[in-house]
Image (cartoon, rainbow, N blue to C red):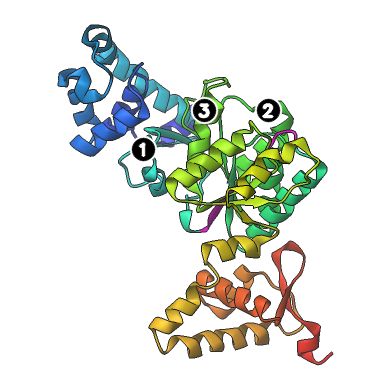
Amino acid sequence: METLARRAMQPEATAHDVALVALSRVPGLGPRQISRLIEQVGSGEAALDAVETASTEQLGLGTSAAPVRGRVSIGRPELRAAREVIDDARSMGLRVLTLGTRQYPRSLLALTDPPPVLFVKGDGDFDHRRCVAIVGTRKASSYGRRSAYALARELGGWGWTVTSGMARGVDASAHEGALDGGGGSIGVLGTGHAHEYPATNRDLYRRMRADGLLVSEFEPPAPPTRHTFPRRNRIIAALARAVVVVEAGERSGALITAEYALDLGREVLCVPGRIDERGSAGSIRLLRQGAGIVARARDVFDALGWLHNETAEQAASPPAPSESADLGRRVVSLLGTHELSPDEIALRLDTPIEATLRAVGRLELEGWLERQGAGRFSVVASRLGR
């Protein structure tokens, strides 16, 4: 009864959504070809018409027309099956986001092969402006797990979102740290939502369903395979402004994510690892190739120029410095002997969270504020004359 009630509350699937699911199920018609079709014709329905009339060369499927043409023919049974996929996903509490719609994450459009369909658990949004990927080996050392957790927790305390792949080791530590810090976390799956892989992350899955986002391009029943996990890495890279690698062996999937990030023009950064750990070999190679070094959140912000954006704005707009200084004074005055998070400060001062975060970051760099537990800040004791 609960499943039927939940399904009844979901809006009817649009013709565009059904068409995209149907197209994504056609063997030989991949995300790249579907993306090109949507770009050319504008909608899923028009794309369905295109696969019935276009030549295989136009679809980018090769020159052997006869066998391929039979595979791209879509009829009523295929459309009915696609609609059932959407209905079943929604009965599981999943959102179905399709390429070409307003809800689809814009940062994924940077990919040459964006996933035509995303199945999403969670009500949050995809804010590319403050999203960092933290990835690394499944066989992480205690140092690697601690480093991933601490960095993600600090980023979460600043209101940033951490995305990773829900694997053991570095991924799991990054998700947990971001949530513990009060930030968002996006888990990109290499399976459908019906599978909790690996099973050891069962508690993390439960927590992510409640407080984070779980994303998959695969239909809910899809099992884990050796091909699905490398595919999800491009989504991790595209969702984030920077990819931070924490411990990666020579053949680590984290290096695939880093390669995608470089292709997309994203920052690639590394937490230095121990030179005698096999799991650090890939990270050391990235550092030799010019990846930036990360020890804490400030290094990420420096690489992205985030805390310095206000300086550029001030140079372009004369009134900004006095307004910025006034906000800084108000923050210090509000804190006094208290400890507050940036969100609490923004709420009490009735200021935008972006401006508040920049003010808090500048005050910390200038030695006025110091970081406490749970993402809170206080005024440095010496500044209070104690």
Percent x, y for residue 81?
Answer: 36, 17
Three-letter amino acid code at the position of disc 2: Pro
Whether label 1 touches label 2, CB < 8 Å: no
Three-letter amino acid code at the position of disc 3: Thr
Residue furthest to the front in view is 288
Which of discs 3 and 1 lies nearer the camera? The answer is 1
Q: Distance between the Cα atoms at labels 3 and 2?
A: 26 Å
Q: Secondary structure at mark 1?
A: loop
Residue furthest to the right in view is 386
Q: Distance between the Cα atoms at labels 3 and 1?
A: 37 Å
Which of discs 3 and 2 lies nearer the camera? The answer is 2
Which residue is found at the position 81% from the left and 41% from the top? 276
Front in this rendered view, residue 1 or 157? 157
Three-letter amino acid code at the position of disc 1: Thr
Q: Secondary structure at mark 3?
A: helix
Percent x, y for residue 280?
Answer: 72, 41
Identify the mark nearer the N-term, 3 or 2: 3
Identify the mark nearer the N-term, 1 or 2: 1
| Residue under numbered circle 2 | 198
Identify the mark nearer the N-term, 3 or 1: 3
Percent x, y for residue 123?
Answer: 51, 46
| Residue under numbered circle 1 | 112
Give the magenta range.
130-139
Q: Quadrant of residue 312?
A: bottom left
Up-down relation of residue 246 to residue 89 (above or below): below
Residue furthest to the top in view is 66
Up-down relation of residue 235 to residue 161 (above or below): above
Percent x, y for residue 180?
Answer: 71, 53
Residue 3 is tagged as 3
